[in-house]
Image: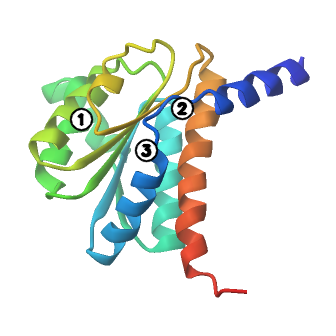
Amino acid sequence: GVRSSFAEISSALELIECAPDAYRHVIEMLRIGREGGVRLFFIGNGGSAAIASHMSADYLKNVHFTTLCFNDPSSLTCISNDLGYDRVFSLPLDHHARIGDILFAISSSGESASITKAVATASQKRMNVVTLSGFNPNNALRKMGGINFYVPSDSYGTVEICHLAILHSMLDEIMADERPAA
């Protein structure tokens, strides 16, 4: 029932795997990046695409980052049809990314070729890469990012909720910087 679902989500949140200072490092990267005009890119498929769109809008609106999220249906279908779905994020990243920009790559499985190919492109462009994945602890995406957040669950709902919680908590910290001290 609902209580067991909440317990699973709570447990997964407590068990998120990342480097000891990963969360603080991303917060600092965001703080410094905002002052330097760094742009944020958010990518994901399916439910992760919804998270990417949500976070792109929130970081733009609430903390005034320039954000990009490649979820436009015309671009997605054009690139998919003409070049292959595995290039839907890597092609626009190749054209838009600059050194020091930040990519948030979101994939429940960590095995989506469109996401891993984009991370490879981001690395070549010397972007900062933050990955959010779940399911298998040895997934491809987790091995590729500079900073990785892994949710130890094989439930899409649990993994997606945890990814959203991670990204929202980072946003809340940056928003707190703008509030007057009490």
Density class for disc 3 (Cα within 10 Å; few <14, some 14-19, many ≥20) is: some
- Residue drawn 45% across the image and 18% down it: 109
Q: Going by the picture, which residue comes out furthest to the front? A: 20
Q: Quadrant of the C terminus?
A: bottom right
Q: Position of residue 3 (x, y in %)?
A: 90, 23
Q: Position of residue 130 (x, y in %)?
A: 36, 42
Instruction: Tell me if residue 79 can be seen.
Output: no
Q: Answer above or below: position of 44 versus 116.
A: below
Amino acid type at circle 3 is Ala
- Residue drawn 64% across the image and 87% down it: 180
Rounded to the nearest angstrom, the CA distance separating label 2 from label 1 is 19 Å
- Callout 3 touching callout 1 (CB < 8 Å): no
Task: Give the numbered dot on residue 22.
Answer: 3
Helix, strand or loop for disc 3: helix
User: Sequence-wise, which precedes: disc 2 or disc 3?
Assistant: 3
Q: Which residue is mark 2?
A: 47
Q: Answer above or below: position of 179 versus 19.
A: below
Q: Position of residue 139 (x, y in %)?
A: 37, 15
Helix, strand or loop for disc 2: helix
Disc 2 versus disc 1: nearer the observer: 1
Q: Answer above or below: position of 37 versus 122.
A: below
Rounded to the nearest angstrom, the CA distance separating label 3 from label 1 is 18 Å
- Residue drawn 16% across the image and 40% down it: 123
Density class for disc 1 (Cα within 10 Å; few <14, some 14-19, many ≥20) is: many
Q: How is colour applied across the structure in the image?
A: rainbow
Q: Which residue is mark 1?
A: 119
